[in-house]
Image: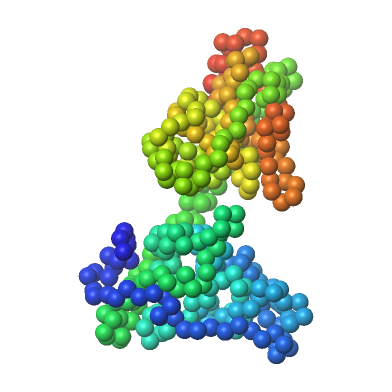
Amino acid sequence: MSNLGYLERLLDGAAVKWVPLGEITLPTSNIRWREIDDLRRYIDLTSVDVTTKKITETKEVSSDDAPSRAQKIVMKDDLIFATTRPTQLRYCLIGDEYSGEIASTGYCVLRANKSTALPKWIMHWLGTPEFKDFVEANQSGAAYPAISDGKVKEFLIPIPCPGDPQQSLAIQGEIVRILDAFTALTAELTAELTAELTARKTQYNHYRNQLLSFEDGEVEWKTLGEIATLRRGRVMSKEYLRDNAGEHPVYSSQTANFGMIGSIGTFDFDGEYVSWTTDGANAGTVFYRNGKFSITNVCGILKGNGSIPLNLKFLFHWLSIEAQKHVYSGMGNPKLMSHQVEKIPVPIPFINDPERSLAEQARIATILD
């Protein structure tokens, strides 16, 4: 294995044996609801917080109203890992308060063989980039990706000093102690940073709304359909991105990395544009683009049509407020298609004085940048 990072460095050269999770975990069992006459707490897929790795909320169920997926009995020190959308890395360690409760079949239950591996030793390996790469490579399904329990248990983790179980567990325990302390410190710093970022975002939103609020007569309102040309991206599969790899970015519907999902040797657009996500959970998310790039079919793109003076950074900041108001969420699939975007009103200051209009748009955009 390569790029093992800090966990391998903490092993400090100790002899290790790489073994599949299935060899260091024990069998688990499902509940027989017909034999149960009391209530059990149900750990659904949404019960585990992806960030904190803690169970946040459960509901009590009985044999009469238990969902069909409420099947897996979990015990103290079990690890549960969500096998649907596995790259989210939704997992947690079961504590005393949930021992004997019931988890969804959407979880893989990993019960450590404590004579060989500590539960937290396994848990920290589930948080590594290597495990995320493994599940991404082995998941199936595009719209609803998933990985089987059996495949999860094929992931290899190192067991230090495999010929000396006592020494092995001691090494695992010391590394777990270090990582637990590091995780606690990281959580504290993250909380402080989150609070600061929230305050900054509130401040930014205040000034943005103030700068983009206009009295009657200060601006002339135009729809995007009147002042811009709109286009849609094209279909690009993972195989296409792989086979045509190059230097020009390709953007899609995700928000991480500014929407970039790969790069190819050609490009569809060159220059300044504003793009938006047309479908899915991120529908209405807006980006300012500048350069040579392409977008996929779940994105739309626009630029001024030359009919009026238009600063695209100004337009980007305006749409970052306005676009979400026009997202249609019918049938559980949010959408912001071109015919909806065309109707979005845009304020144009000093529309009859192009030089003054562009200067005012640039002033506002510069402040918000």
Residue drawn at x 63%, y 22% is: 228
Q: Quadrant of the N terminus?
A: bottom left
> Which of the 4 image quarters holds residue 307?
top right
User: Along the horizontal axis of the image, is 275 left or right of 60?
Assistant: left
In the rendered view, tell whether residue 227 sits above or below residue 155: above
> Which of the 4 image quarters holds residue 178?
bottom left
Can residue 17 be seen here? The reply is yes
Residue 212 placement (x, y as % from top left): 64, 28
| Colour pattern of the rendering | rainbow
Residue 346 placement (x, y as % from top left): 67, 25
User: Along the horizontal axis of the image, is 59 left or right of 113?
Assistant: right
Residue drawn at x 50%, y 28% is: 269
Residue 103 placement (x, y as % from top left): 61, 75
Instruction: Tell me how many marks there are.
Output: 0
Residue drawn at x 38%, y 61% is: 130
User: Along the horizontal axis of the image, is 302 left or right of 37?
Assistant: left
Residue 248 placement (x, y as % from top left): 42, 34
Q: Looking at the picture, tell me which residue is in the foreground, 107 or 185.
A: 107
In the rendered view, tell whether residue 83 sits above or below residue 365: below
Can residue 200 be seen here? The reply is no
Residue drawn at x 53%, y 36% is: 295
